[in-house]
Amino acid sequence: MKKIYMILLVLILVFVLAACASNDSPAPAPAPDPAPADSDADDANGDEDLIFLTLEELAQFDGRGDNLAYVAIDGIIYDVTNVPQWRSGSHQGNMAGQDLTDVINNRAPHGTRVLGNLPVVGRLVD
Ligand code: HEM
């Protein structure tokens, strides 16, 4: 009789231990989707939204009529559409839609300090 009790006790212990072991390692939570279709995760470096324009293409962004006003400085394209001083794409005799690197470096009284406030929209390419 004592033997049966011992066997039962061992069996119960085995079951209890097995149950504990399975609770120690619950099924892992599903990994987050690395690239959901509508995620902005790829935009972390900001490059996703940049546009690449040749000088010829940039010319369309002259700020006239409904056109946006873009200016390229040192290969970076800035949006001056909403800058009051660039109304209608014109500023101190300069027109938007152009590479004005030389102008801002050598003729503008403010130099490149004004660029820090402008949205960067793209890069100038060959
Ligand atoms: C002959 C060339 C230029 C002259 C004489 C000129 C002159 C001026 C003057 C007098 C102002 C207002 C005062 C100031 O903010 O310092 C101004 C503002 C400004 N200029 Fe020019 N500028 C020239 C070229 C450029 C170019 C090439 C850019 C290119 C993006 C530029 C961008 C701006 C901006 C964004 C402002 C507004 C500044 C702000 O309020 O943050 N300018 N400029």
Image: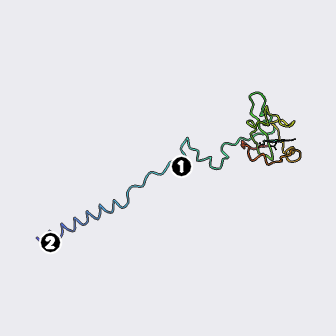
Furthest-left residue in this view: 1
Furthest-bottom residue in this view: 2
Nearest-to-viewer mark from 1 and 2: 1
28 w.r.t. 120: above or below: below
User: Mark 1 CB in 8 Å range of ligand 1?
Assistant: no
Q: Where's ligand 1: which quadrant?
A: top right
Residue at the spot 80% in from the left edge and 34% down from the top edge: 89
14 w.r.t. 86: above or below: below
Residue 113 x, y percent position in the rendering? 79, 48
84 w.r.t. 6: above or below: above
Residue at the spot 18% in from the left edge and 66% down from the top edge: 8
* Mark 1 / mark 2, whichever is N-terminal: 2
Residue under label 1: 34
Residue 42 lies left or right of residue 121; in this view the side is left
Residue 111 x, y percent position in the rendering? 83, 47
Mark 1: few/some/many CA within 10 Å (<14, 14-19, 20+): few
Image quadrant in which the N terminus is located: bottom left
Image quadrant in which the C terminus is located: top right
Q: Nearer the viewer, residue 122 or 70?
A: 70
Identify the disc placed on residue 3: 2
Residue at the spot 74% in from the left edge and 39% down from the top edge: 79
119 w.r.t. 10: above or below: above
Q: Amino acid at mark 1?
A: Pro
Furthest-right residue in this view: 107
Q: Nearer the viewer, residue 38 or 84?
A: 84
Mark 2: few/some/many CA within 10 Å (<14, 14-19, 20+): few
Q: Amino acid at mark 2?
A: Lys
Residue at the spot 55% in from the left edge and 41% down from the top edge: 38
